[in-house]
Image (cartoon, coloured by chain):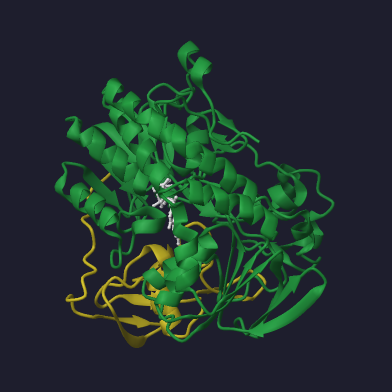
Chain colours: A yellow, B green
Amino acid sequence: MPEPAPTRIASTSASAPPVALTVNGVPLTVAPGTTVAAAVCIAGAHARTSVSGEPRGPLCGMGICFECRVTVDGTPHRRGCQVLCAPGMDVRTS
Amino acid sequence: MSAHFDLVVVGAGPAGIAAAIAAARAGRSVALVDDNPAPGGQIWRHGAHLPAAARKWLVELQASSVVPFYGWRVIDHPAARLIRAESGADCTDLQYDRLILATGARERFLPFPGWTLPNVLGAGGLDAMVRGGLPIAGKRVVVAGTGPLLFAVAGHLAARGAKILAICEQAQLGHLASFARCLLSDPAKLFQGAGYMLAARGARLHTGCWPVAAAGTTQLESVTLCQGSRKWTVACDYLACGFHLAPNTELAQLLGCRTAYGFVVTDDLQRTSVTDVFCAGEPTGIGGVELALIEGQIAGLAAAGKLRDAQSLVPRRQRKLGFVAALRESCTLNPSLRNLADEDTIVCRCEDVRHAALRGRASWRDAKLHTRCGMGPCQGRICGVATEFLFAWHADSVRPPVLPAMVSSLASPGPTRNQPASLSAETAISAHSKETP
Ligand SMILES: Cc1cc2nc3c(=O)[nH]c(=O)nc-3n(C[C@H](O)[C@H](O)[C@H](O)COP(=O)(O)OP(=O)(O)OC[C@H]3O[C@@H](n4cnc5c(N)ncnc54)[C@H](O)[C@@H]3O)c2cc1C
Ligand code: FES
């Protein structure tokens, strides 16, 4: 088991540079502090398709509902509303 | 390897922050764990535009010796005085002498036709998305549901340039009036409903009104509202709809803490029925940010052994309890809302279980077994709260993980789970809940 790795507050100051990432391969630039869930909406994509085939997007915005889950840098089922966009991030919806 | 702290605080909302700072000031080693990438909980996260008081708490937290674990969610309690947290694919165990649960609350959602369409969100949900960078300027928004959160959200979104088309509160005006009286009698004016109303000016407030359907092809295009026998349809970009809050008590239940009426029972010093486990903020009763801060400080001081200092804050807590009761009263759901869902309406969004499949079921357990309702990744956090209202079902006992975990996090063997300590005599005498019907 790895040693706990404390995280410091992510910088959300307006002076920080914009963040460039891709959503389904399409380049997108967002303000620092933008969540992956918001980036997916900005890209005009839906986060996921439900088991009966409905498009779904975020509901709770706070990590509870799992409707915003996407694949981030190859890791599936990340809750987009709980992950901040980072430079070079590869976000995939399903 | 696992790290040891005198005190582990779960939840970095106002309650958890206040608790962590109070205990660190008293010289204790403190870990503060939160699922979110930043501290602040439901109200103070996503940094910008915070009131001065909030910034003061966050600055003090950053300057303190509190060890942050942001982006870590607590998923299990594998052994006595040990909790397990995971972050992405990483997993760690934190040992504690004392534990403070400040896990907050989530929005209550009720199913209605079309509520699964993209761009139908919770009220707090849309607010959080906007704080997280979703552009809202110029968008047409209907805010609906119940509770003061609707006004806070409408005000915030309006300030960011959203066009608030309507605020629909399910409660009748009479219910709101008693709540408004309470707000006026509390100079702190929690939620500052009136001010937010002004900020959202231009928006019509409809009372006794709720959405009966949302429509759109691949995302929301319009919402149909009803007020008594009147029905009308409004074209909009977003529906922000939440029916007040439900406490996050899963971790407390996993630890064996006693609950009553759905809330964690504590004594005056925020001690739960389990020895050395404290609880503060919304899980003990929905009461807003100021009460969460007071309870957090009491819990932090008490857990650090500063009992007299903790005790000195208790009267301040007591003065806020009238607000808790008024809030509960004003947010009581109209029974007609049980008829919102039709037989095709999805109730469990994870497994797409429709209302028709649930109607004949005897209990939550029966529904889970036969329909997979509540078996998806949210583990019934959304549909469990809804079915409690719709069918008067109660969720069965909580099992780990309290949030879906990566399989590897659960595989590591641990000593046997500790048994909850029985209610001590002292706790039994003074134990109470903020929430009594
Ligand atoms: C949009 C909005 C506006 C509001 N406006 C006002 C207002 O104007 N005035 C007012 O008084 N109140 C307001 N509220 C209510 C206020 O947010 C709450 O009263 C307050 O946040 C409660 O604080 P808390 O610390 O108890 O819980 P929370 O703020 O909910 O914090 C709990 C934290 O615990 C974390 N957590 C839970 N479980 C786990 C776990 N297993 N592992 C790791 N982390 C976990 C959560 O992610 C969360 O960050 C508002 C709420 C919202 C959503
Ligand atoms: S929107 Fe609910 S978990 Fe992200």
Horizontal side of residue B212 vs B116, given as left or right: right
Against B175, residue B116 (above or below) is below
Horizontal side of residue B138 vs B355, given as left or right: left
Q: Residue A69 or B157: which is nearer the viewer?
A: B157
> Can residue B169 be seen by looking at this rendering?
yes
Q: Position of residue B40 (x, y in %)?
A: 33, 54
Residue at (53%, 26%) from the top-left corner? B432
Q: Is the N terminus of chain A in the top left, top right, bottom left or bottom right quadrant?
A: top left
Q: Residue B182 or B112: which is nearer the viewer?
A: B182
Against B98, residue A68 (above or below) is below
Residue at (25%, 56%) from the top-left corner? B55
Q: Position of residue B263 (x, y in %)?
A: 55, 37
Residue at (35%, 28%) from the top-left corner? B81
Q: Position of residue A76 (x, y in %)?
A: 43, 66
Residue B435: quarter of image: top right
Q: Position of residue B407 (x, y in %)?
A: 44, 50
Against B274, residue B328 (above or below) is below
The residue lying furthest to the top in this view is B425
> Can residue B422 be seen by looking at this rendering?
no
Residue B116: quarter of image: bottom right
